Image: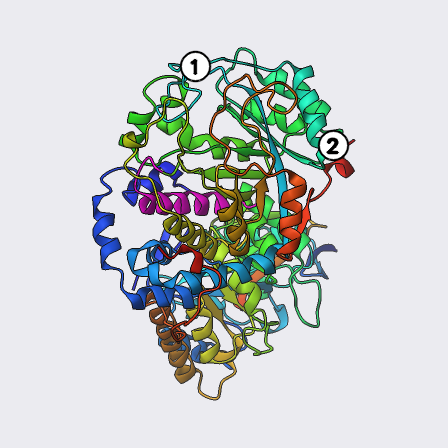
Amino acid sequence: MKSLHVNGVERQFAPDEMPATVSDLLGHLNVTAAVAVVEIDGVIVRPEAFADTPLTEGQTIELVRFVGGG
Amino acid sequence: MDKLIIADRQFDSRLLVGTGKFTSPKAMAEALTASEAEIVTVALRRVDIDDAQDDTLREIDRDRFLLLPNTSGARSAEEAVRLSRLARAATGIHWVKLEVTPDPYYLLPDPIETLKAAEILVKEGFVVLPYINADPILARRLADLGTATVMPLGSPIGSNQGLKTRAALEIIIEQSTVPVVVDAGLGLPSHVAEAMEIGADAVLVNTAIATAADPVEMALAFKLAVEAGRKAYESGPRVATRGAEASSPLTGFLRD
Amino acid sequence: MDNSVRDILARHRLDADRDQWQQRLGDVTAQDVEAALASRPGSYGLDKLLALISPAAEPYLEPMARISRQLTIQRFGRTIRLYAPLYLSNYCINRCRYCGFNQGNAFTRTRLTIEEALADAEILAAEGFRDILLVSSEDKRFIDTKYLEALAAQLRKTFSFIGIEIYQMPTVHYRRLFEAGVEGVTLYQETYDRAAYAHYHPAGPKADYEMRLRGPDDMADAGMREIGLGVLLGLADWRIETLALGAHARYLTKRYWQSHISFSFPRLRPASGVSAAEFPHMLTDKHFVQMMLALRLCFADAGIVISTREPAPLRDRLIELGVTRMSAGSRTNPGGYSGPESSSEQFEVHDQRSPAEIGAMLKEHGFDLVWKDWDRAFLQV
């Protein structure tokens, strides 16, 4: 099993099921519409790059969105 | 009335509105429209994977409103800088409302972490609007660093107490070389009118509009109050005058 | 801050084409003056200052004086600080038409060696002074930065405040003097009117109007805590000069928020080679007071400095109106304290009283005489 840390939670994937790119991960979690920007191991990934950014097991990923605020 | 100028942009509206605490995205959108604000603040949070909502931004017409991401939640300069960079990457906007609030009870801003973060962010090319307590020296130091405004609080966030810091605000307004946006604690339209009357360049309101029984009407009330206060300020208020003096002990010696 | 003081003065027509201001001064009404008086005391506004110096404000000197006095006492207490000027040289390469030390005037020129200056300073210290103002004409070859550094380094052992009122210098030199113990610089623009400036400063380094205007910026950049501004009253219309002075002070207080501004009011008085006919803008005591009060009402924290150019009876009255600093027992000729009365004076001293006598007068008026404000010595390494 391969794992990714996503928003503070460890998620396990069967080796052939692990999302290959950021886009795949968002689709798998069904959060595509919500995500504004992604951070992988502290590095920011812009929306334009989601489809082209590969994932490796063990990475720490933050999925961030905009919410109401003052 | 003359325009509000922040960094390289000009605005007709001097009312900035926050998007938090509304009952629904629709209610928020309607209130924003009624307020005629041109700058609205938003925050950044983790996506809730088990209950993912649509991106809040979808409800905000980005042709009409300038999105101003804030760094709420940051408790240190490092966290604020990180949030700012994320926001910029997400939107392409390099404006940020810098908010560093380690105190979870009153959400008062930390002056030292704010100064540290401001210095870094200005160097990275951000247009920085720092939220601070009404500290005139801190305001000067931030302007010296190159922040685009200062945003002193009227009273703690959400307290709706109005201009508890009025005396200090007056000093900040007198001394500031950048626009002064009074933020936080503005609970009533009369509060924002007062802020504008004493010379603030703009105000930011969130809680009072979002939690009103009728947010659309309240947004309109705030809009009118900002305009009234600004008009009063620009027309030079006259105070009641004193009567004539009979004796001249101090200057009588000058009589020719 | 994009605007330099030069740009601000030009934009408001305070340096040239000043005629529009005569019209505006004439248009000020009693209501305008009363509104100015009712505004927050000590807060600046160009329109406010205009109202206070206008002819319409002349009947209001008493209320202006009351506000000024109250404001000054609130900010500074019932204290007046005494300082003594120490003239180092009257050799000069400028040819300012109004000055007794004008290069064209023939008189006995003197300059003090460091030892001689220290001898004079010792006398001043013995009289109680801890605030000294080093004054010199433009005698760069002798009274140069090195000289001043060496002198200041000695003086700082005795005096807690050393100011200078000398020819203008670049920031790096002001910085050297600051490191040596000089904390304040007085540099009068003399006049903000470009045409008048050109007329009265025909030759020498001081003839450069814009360079002169930059002086306070340079000294503030060097870290000087006290910046002394002023115009030589008599060179141009005092009302417009006051507006320009106010605009300059406002610019400096906003830009250099860690420095403190003072206003001085040198009034032209007869001196060797200077005739009254040449100067059509002399002002009366009444207008002198109006100018001082107007500035105090717009600058709550500014120092207001009165020298011994002014006669004793007037000075005694002025202390009730907002003065914070005054000179005493002054000798305006180099070596005047210790040596014989052979060298020539820059201006006639009209208040000849000794510090002790001034001190007694102040006490009578309920003021405390202050010799020093704070001690930089605490911060010295």
Give the chain of mark 1: C
Q: Amino acid at mark 2?
A: Ala
Give the main secondary structure, helix, strand or loop, of the magenta stretch.
helix
Location of residue B75 by image quarter: bottom right
Q: Circle 2 — which element?
A: helix
Q: Give the labeled residue for mark 2.
A: C126
Q: Is residue B42 above or below residue C220?
A: below
Q: Which residues are magenta?
A: C234-258
Q: Amino acid at mark 1?
A: Ile
Residue C49 in the image, given as x and y percentages of width and height: 37, 55
Q: Circle 1 — which element?
A: loop
* In the image, residue B182 lies in the stretch drawn in magenta: no
- Can you tell which mark lies on residue C93? 1
Q: Is residue B241 left or right of residue B47?
A: left
Q: Is residue C144 above or below residue C238?
A: above
User: Which is more toward the observer, C1 or C89?
Assistant: C89
Location of residue C125 by image quarter: top right
Q: Residues within 10 Å of mark 2 (few under 14, many from 20)?
A: few
Q: Is residue B169 above or below residue C301?
A: below
Q: How is the image coloured?
A: rainbow
Residue at the outermost bottom position:
B213
Q: Could you tell me how far apart the alpha carbons at marks 2 and 1 are, in whole angstroms?
A: 34 Å
Whether labels 2 and 1 share one chain: yes
Numbered disc in front, either 2 or 1: 2
User: Which is more toward the observer, C79 or C51?
Assistant: C79
Residue B180 in the image, given as x and y percentages of width and height: 48, 59
Residue at the outermost top position:
C141
Give the chain of mark 2: C
